[in-house]
Amino acid sequence: MANLTEAHKANDIRQKKLAENFNQAIDHEAAIMGCGRECFKKAKADGKCPSEIFMECCNDGVIRVDFAEVNTAAIIENHYGDAENL
């Protein structure tokens, strides 16, 4: 049981460090792209994924982030030929 407790503490330390590094990266990227830093931090605190964060916080900055519909079957056929022949 002691090993499990130690592993849990070590994991908590790793998770805290990862969160700190992510927040530093957010500040860095927000400065480069002209995105709102406070928006980034709030979205991160709300548990949003990076794509949601960029869509929400960067669309009034230097870049425009949006999702597009992709026809995966057409991409595969353009690259590999008819799907029946794979």
Image (tube, grey):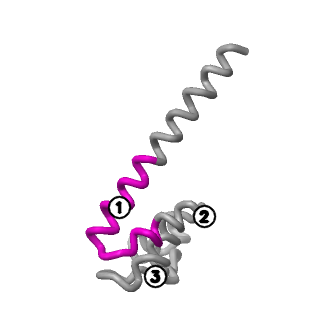
Q: Give the left or right position of residue 61, taking residue 48 as reference.
A: left
| Residue found 29% across the figure and 73% down from its top | 33
Q: Amino acid at mark 2?
A: Asp
Please, what secondary structure does the residue beneath circle 1 have?
A: helix
User: Which residue is the extreme one toward the front?
Assistant: 38
Residue 27 % position (x, y): 35, 61
Mark pair 2, 1: CA separation: 17 Å
Question: Is disc 2 in contact with disc 1, using a CB cutoff of under 8 Å?
Answer: no
Residue 5 % position (x, y): 67, 21
Residue 65 % position (x, y): 41, 80
Q: Circle 3 is placed at which residue position?
A: 66
Mark number, residue 46: 2
Q: Nearer the viewer, residue 62 or 31?
A: 31
Q: Amino acid at mark 3?
A: Asp
How many residues crowd around disc 3 within 10 Å: few (fewer than 14), some, or many (20 or more)? few
Question: Which range of residues does the magenta coloring cover?
Answer: 20-40
Question: Is disc 2 in contact with disc 3, using a CB cutoff of under 8 Å?
Answer: no
Q: Report the mark closest to the observer, 3 or 1.
A: 1
How many residues crowd around disc 2 within 10 Å: few (fewer than 14), some, or many (20 or more)? few
**Is 44 rendered above or below residue 10?**
below
| Residue found 41% across the figure and 83% down from its top | 59
Q: Which of marks 3 and 2 precedes in the sequence? A: 2
Residue 85 part of the magenta segment:
no
Q: Amino acid at mark 1?
A: Asp
| Residue found 42% across the figure and 52% down from its top | 22
User: Which residue is the extreme one toward the right?
Assistant: 1
Q: In this rendering, does residue 86 appear at all?
A: no
Mark pair 3, 1: CA separation: 21 Å
Please, what secondary structure does the residue beneath circle 3 have?
A: loop
Q: Nearer the viewer, residue 52 or 42?
A: 42
Q: Report the mark closest to the observer, 2 or 3.
A: 2
